[in-house]
Amino acid sequence: MLIDFNIKEKIKELKSNGKNLPAEYFDLGVAFWLLNPDEKEYTPEYLSKKYLHNERNPSTRASSELQPNSSGLSKLHQFAQKKLKEYKLQHLFKDLEMPLIDILSDMELRGIRLDIEALKKLDQRLQRAIEELVRGIYKKAGKTFNINSPKQISALLFEKLKVDSGGIRKTKSGGFSTDIEMLSLLKDRHPIVAQLIEYRELFKMQSTYVRPLQELVGNDGRIHTNYIQTGTATGRLSSQHPNLQNIPNGTAWATALRSCFVADRGYTLVSFDYSQIELRILASLSGDPKMIEAFERGLDIHTATAANIFNVDPKKVTSEMRRVAKTLNFGVVYGMGAIAFSKTSGLSFAEAKKFIAEYFSDFSKIKEWQERIKEQVRTAGYVTNLNGRRRWLLKAVSMFRGESAEAERAAINMPVQGLAADIIKVAMVQVAAELKRKGWWNNQVRMLLTIHDELLFEIKDDIMKEAIPLIARSMESAYQLAVPITVTIKRGKNWGRVS
DNA sequence: TTTGTGTGCCAC
DNA sequence: AAACGTGGCACACAAA
Ligand SMILES: Nc1nc2c(ncn2[C@H]2C[C@H](O)[C@@H](COP(=O)(O)OP(=O)(O)OP(=O)(O)O)O2)c(=O)[nH]1
Ligand SMILES: [Mn+2]
Ligand SMILES: [Mn+2]
């Protein structure tokens, strides 16, 4: 058995060189992450110092110092084994996280094709639009300055241009805040502000996405992200270099950017996204009869909330309205206050307070479930999800009210977000196994991206008709809840496509 | 020159 | 963001 850190990288190396893979492996970083997903890092140096009280990297120590069988790595292994068993995490480790490594390594090696020419054109369009905005901003300002500096924007607006600063929040370091909420407030007070807002949007697109993506395209014309299996405290994956889990979505610029992610010739991009996934999980965990019935009837609670808040017929709910409602639905169940709710929804403070109160009286079992979680985290110092995944939250008993409240909200979130993470991981393992049985894995069907509750595939056109229902049914049956689990399927030659 | 903090914003 | 949660990343600015 291969016992080491960063096994995903080692597997990728072996696969790239056509070597045989170890039959069994034990990733120490992932093991320690399951034991405590809030560690600062999961390196041999850090963990052996912390758990073995040993300063040096256990894997690079001179062999002369070592007793056979008691090297630092096997000490860490023994410790992790013992604790995984004690915490009942072996199942998650052995049957979910370790099998996932093989899948993630295939996904990272495969990468996703980028249309470089389209991206360059988008860059140029952005560049021209940004230059135009900069000209207009400097003209209205009567001087040049660094528009990327919140400090300089503040000085310009409130000192040089004498814009009324009434109602403008201060940052914790004392200056006026210039975030989107404050700029929206200032939009009616000076014509420069609308241009600043648009500049922010375009500069973000260019500096965070369009430029770095061009840099990171490989010789194969594809982008290879790195999934961090130890990257979150709830069980989700994270994605780095580049992060492909936060590619813009919804605006015209976002669609243009997503259109640069394309399928190989003869293939189609197909995405499968779980519907209202954490609300379904919450309904199931809490046993709330009303929410369970809503899902059994096939209702869309995000749409219902949007219709309610915006006072329109559910059929008239737009995707932007539904996204706002999504923020509100999850906000409420994870502890949002009436002030934040009113700002996000546009409702008055009183209406917001009423909405939240009615939400918890409609779905009263959710409130009861939350109270049980709060009790658990206070008494045990940790919470677990349905599969035993664990998060330590010792601050739940902090003497500082803000700290304990924050820990309680995290405690309420973890069992839900963490089960959603487990469900998609189970789905990935199950789908991969079924596709391998078909002989399609990594050939006619390529799993490209995992985005929290969504899988993006590249599928050969001639087997789409068979592959799509196979994947969808597999994802929907990956886990049994008290409510049905469904996926929404979208397809196109590029990622900016319509349904 | 590098490193760390603050601000801000993209996604789920 | 004044009581939604989970992330990654770019940039300004100050300190090392
Ligand atoms: N706490 C919190 N969680 C969020 C937020 N946005 C998304 N999530 C979590 C909960 C969602 O169920 C999960 C997947 O995000 P999606 O965008 O796919 O939304 P969801 O599946 O709920 O609805 P959908 O039917 O796919 O549009 O991520 C948010 O603003 N706050
Ligand atoms: Mn979803
Ligand atoms: Mn999603």
Image (tube, coloured by chain):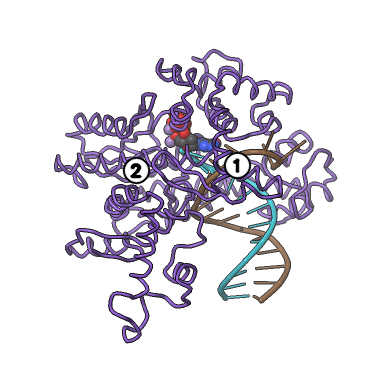
Chain colours: A purple, B cyan, C brown
Judged by depth in the image, the label closer to the viewer, 2 or 1, is 1
Question: Which structural element holds mark 1?
Answer: helix
State which quarter of the image contains the N terminus of chain A.
bottom left
Chain label for disc 1: A
Chain label for disc 2: A
Q: Earlier in the sequence, mark 2 or mark 1?
A: 1
Number of other residues with Cα within 10 Å of mark 2, as a class: few under 14, some 14 to 19, many 20 or more = many
Question: Which structural element holds mark 2?
Answer: helix
Locate residue A424: give its quadrant.
Answer: top left
Q: Is residue A448 left or right of residue A370?
A: left
Q: In the image, is residue A69 above or below residue A151?
A: below
Task: Find disc 1 in the rendering and name its residue.
Answer: A408
Most distant residue in the top direction: A313
Residue A215, visible in the rendered structure: yes
User: Is the C-beta separation of discs 2 and 1 under 8 Å?
Assistant: no
Q: Is residue A273 left or right of residue A311?
A: left
Which quadrant does ligand 3 occupy? top left
Residue in view at x 42 percent, y 49 percent: A237
Of residues A86 and A326, the one nearer the viewer is A86
Separation of marks 2 and 1 at Cα, in angstroms: 26 Å
Locate residue A333: give its quadrant.
Answer: top right
Task: Find disc 2 in the rendering and name its residue.
Answer: A425
